[in-house]
Amino acid sequence: MPKDSGIGASTKRREDIRFLTGEGNYTDDINIHGQAYVHFLRSDVAHGTLTSVDTTAAAGMPGVVRIFTGSDFEGVGGMPCGWQVTDRHGQPMQEPAHPILAQGKVRHVGEPIAAVVADTAEQARDAAEAIVVDIAELPAVVDMKAALEAGATRVHDDLDNNLCYDWGFVEENKDAVNKAFEDAAHVTSLELVNNRLVANPMEPRVAVGDYARGTDESTLYTTSQNPHVIRLLMGAFVLGIPEHKLRVVAPDVGGGFGTKIFHYQEEAFCTFAAKACNRPVKWTSSRTEAFMSDAHGRDHVTKIELALDADNNFTALRTETHANMGAYLSTFAPSVPTWLHGTLMAGNYKTPLIYVNVKAVFTNTVPVDAYRGAGRPEATFQLERVVDKAARELGVDPIALRRQNFITEFPYATPVAVEYDTGDYHATMDKLEAMGDFAGFAARRAESEKNGKLRGLGVNCYIEACGIAPSNLVGQLGARAGLYESATVRVNATGGLVVMTGSHSHGQGHETAFPQVIAEMIGIDESMVEIVHGDTANTPMGMGTYGSRSLAVGGSAMVRATEKIINKARKIAAHLLEASEGDIELKDGAFSVAGTDKSVAWGDVTLAAYVPHNYPLEDIEPGLEETAFYDPANFTYPSGAYACEVEVDPDTGKVTIERFCAADDFGNIVNPMIVTGQVHGGLAQGIGQALLENCSYDENGQLLSASYMDYAMPRADDLPMFQVDHEDGTPCTHNPLGVKGCGEAGAIGSPPSVVNAVVDALQSAGKDVTHIDMPLSPDRVWAAMNP
Amino acid sequence: RTLLSSFLREELKLTGTHVGCDTSQCGACVVHVDGVAVKACTMLAAEADGAVVTTIEGMANADGSLSVIQQAFQDHHGLQCGFCTPGMVMSAAALLKENPRPSEAEVREYLEGNICRCTGYHNIVKAIMAASGQDVAALAAE
């Protein structure tokens, strides 16, 4: 029977009340008395030399407070990159300067050139139009392979070329991998594109800078997934503000999906300008600005090869990927095609030899960084496509080929440097086969045929690595940050608790799920626990929310802090009960002496901690508040198997998703309702990538898809009802909750099954189609069918 | 040149109405003007002169409790980050007024003008059908 509270209960979300009644507090809802508004004048060309920026006329426009250009930031630090990758030859990546406002050159459409601060947003916009910018255009570098040719135009004059790094992983395996290909009975190869996407949280980015002259304190309100990271990067590396004089607040945030992890120029600008103008300064992104200033995602071009022996065992895997960095390095960009991608290339399979080569390339496009899944969708897509292609070439069942090569013993050390702690890929596939009613597929295909449609079934597996850690390991891999999480648990005198977490909720439901854990640990009602997050002034230093890490890392910190609380409360209870501490048991919100009817309620113990009249003051301090920092021993490894059934209209090429099933192993689950919702959302984004979404540039570096008129977001009528099953997972072995993370799975796991299904549909009709690049829009599918 | 959405948010400080795009695509700003669902970013405030405008702030029951539609969104987890939610609730109310027992396909078609990036729409569709009094248990095996 489902639980109605605590761990495992589908507790309804408490945060919904404010969101459903219009009482949310998003950054754009914040207005500070006397605030001015900023409008950024952005480059409308992809590449050029700034010959002049004349602000004379604009400065005299009504309401203008001050106009800033690149020269105002000459003594200020540029935007920092948080991850340094070392290349195949042991050399550090090439790392260009990244100014707040363009200095000397513009390198992508949308790069900010000048910023107008005015009394109203309209005045700022009008004045920006009066700025006269003269740009001597240069050839734009757009295509990654052309960018690496000798003599190609350089995006950055001071770098050797457009190659950020050439990464080999594991470099020592390269010769053995090549040898295995020479010895292979069969080799399947595939060239594919992982299409460039824009994360598009529905809330555009907003920044409000405020400065208190009297105390020399700066405050930034911003749409961020990790306010402490912004405080550290902006304070220490950009503006030189010590952390005790800088507060960063990320209130209700309307979705992130990765793109609100990064530190952006607009945040630094508003903080800087608030002090320079001695007025609060607010910037609200328009959607068009978001398309040309939010970090984009994916954009890999890959050749993958799979070697098999005569018995269809995978013997080696070799990949070569070009990964687009855009014009500058966004905060965590270098890590995405390397440590979040190469380490996942084993997937669910015991392939013994793997070599991954990644060339990261600068182009005159918006910077590219993590988007839901970040590197893992790219790894999963190419691997699951090539496995499917191999099965079709060999004439074997795609599921049987996968099962034959599954990893079955755990822990399992892959040849790409990670160790999976738990999983049961056969069990997950069993769940998928039951849920997907594969036995009934032939009948459904016949029914589609009667209606003039081609029906296809595609399956894939996935593995991902979440809760990226531990800090000392990622430090060796190039991270310039730690990846722990923190929690302070404050117990009030009358027994209620406040948890101040370094995690951040922007839709994931921390305010509901985190209290479920504490309620279970102490045996009290969930309503006695409140979660505080998103403000550096009242939460301990935390690394924020991304990489499906909140519960696995942030939740673990909360558990550790709560354990400290319980240990201290037990000592107090022992004193109150005049018993030995070892005999004290905590159950249902009361401490009791084992084997007796003597007990003291939770609230009486907490009251004693703050009114310590009858209290062991000689042994322990009054009060009941504890902090824990949790640094995980390993990543967590959620896994799953997905199935997609499509109908293709042979006359138009339109693909319709008829059925989508997701079987996931997330380990233990705290709130099944929330987990199901996370899977649904991930699936929609993965299906969106596969069928609809594409961020498109022309050969001059013009962004063609800068609005919802041109960038196809998934709408309600593009998607089916989903079937999901994530019960009975294999618990993570190295965190106290046994949880693995669920936020990215749907987006990682769904694109290959969609493409596999369309290929299956077309091949069933005798079409010689082995691959179509995403998105599988009607024109692309029709063209593939009618060569 | 003040848009109705700007007037609501900036003059009246009714910040429940959200603005998620600049091409009238996303639907986060849907309000009711004289009972009809309107994207508040497509209308000048002056055009609403004399009309009755209902926003998300006016959708709860008189005693402050959630309305049937709002309650269905909470019961069926029809929201995550909450940013598109006001527009979704306003559109759902308009749909159910015009079509009290919509089919799944009708709900999906009606929501064409409301984009949600979090939920994949599954639970929004479920919530709206549940709010219409239909049994949603059979919609999908979860």
Image (cartoon, rainbow, N blue to C red):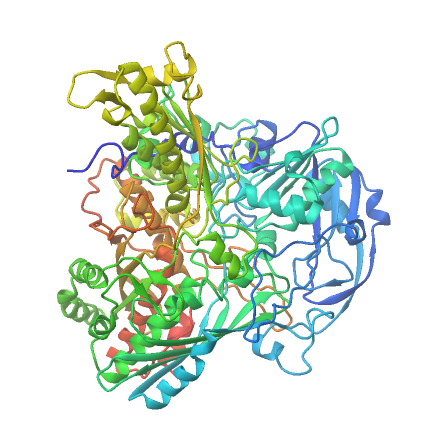
In the depicted view, which residue is nearer to us: A13 or A754?
A13
In the depicted view, which residue is nearer to us: A521 or B117?
A521
- State which quarter of the image contains the N terminus of chain A: top left
> Residue farthest to the top?
A613
* Residue B4 to residue A171: above or below: above
> Residue farthest to the front?
A618
* Residue A280 to residue A674: above or below: above
Q: Position of residue A506 (x, y in %)?
A: 45, 42
Residue A164, visible in the rendered structure = yes
Residue A453, visible in the rendered structure = no
In the depicted view, which residue is nearer to us: A130 or A726?
A726
Give the quarter of the image for residue A698. Answer: bottom right
- State which quarter of the image contains the C terminus of chain A: bottom left
Q: Position of residue A425 (x, y in %)?
A: 23, 62
Q: Position of residue A330 (x, y in %)?
A: 59, 58
Count of numbered badges drawn on the protein: 0
Q: Which residue is drawn at 74% across and 35% down?
A: A119
* Residue B125 to residue A751: above or below: above
In the depicted view, which residue is nearer to us: A630 or A213?
A630
Q: Position of residue A476 (x, y in %)?
A: 52, 60
Q: Is residue B38 left or right of residue A706?
A: left
